[in-house]
Image: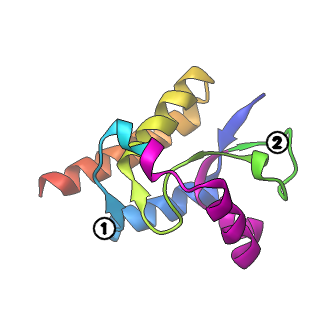
Amino acid sequence: MTIKLNERAYRHAKRLVEEGEWIHDEREAWSDHHPSTQTEEEFIERNGFFEYGKWFLGVNDEYSKDRRRHYELPYGDFDKVHRCSILAAQSRARQSEALDVENAAADLLAVIDEQARD
């Protein structure tokens, strides 16, 4: 399995972060903040896979673009970026040796942490 950077999602996340649409939460919070399977399915039904894919920093080409499993490493809840999800994505990317995703996550974290200090 090879995970690679979802450039479209990275640009979307970067824009949201720059607009202040993020939550500065701790690493452990993602288990509570992660959208449920039902929420994900409802989002896909309303918006389609193109919009769904914007919320995942990684893609897995072993699965087609019209499958949930194609999209990996979520960074938010379909509304805001969550710092905890980016931390989780960065860690999983490191484990999967997906350097481009790990670097994108680090970039997003740096912007969030900088804005949080201001």
Instruction: Measuring from the top left, give residue 50's x and y in whole percent.
Output: 73, 67
Quadrant of image for the N terminus: top right
* Residue at the spot 70% in from the left edge and 76% down from the top edge: 47
Instruction: Measuring from the top left, give residue 35's x and y in whole percent.
Output: 55, 56
Report the residue marked by disc 1.
20
Mark 1: few, some, or many residues within 10 Å (few <14, many ≥20)?
A: some
Residue type beneath disc 1: Gly
* Residue at the spot 76% in from the left edge and 65% down from the top edge: 49
Q: Main secondary structure of the magenta part?
A: helix
Report the residue marked by disc 2.
61
Colour setup of the view: rainbow
Q: Could you say which quadrant of the image residue 42 lies in?
A: bottom right
Tell me: residue 62, above or below residue 10. Answer: above
Tell me: residue 11, above or below residue 47. Answer: above
Quadrant of image for the C terminus: bottom left
Instruction: Measuring from the top left, give residue 20's x and y in whole percent.
Output: 30, 68
Residue 39 sits inside the magenta stretch:
yes
Residue type beneath disc 2: Asp
* Residue at the spot 82% in from the left edge and 42% down from the top edge: 61
Instruction: Measuring from the top left, give residue 115's x and y in whole percent.
Output: 21, 57
Residue 33 in sight here: yes
Q: Which residues are magenta?
A: 31-58
Task: Identify the mark nearer the N-term, 2 or 1.
Answer: 1
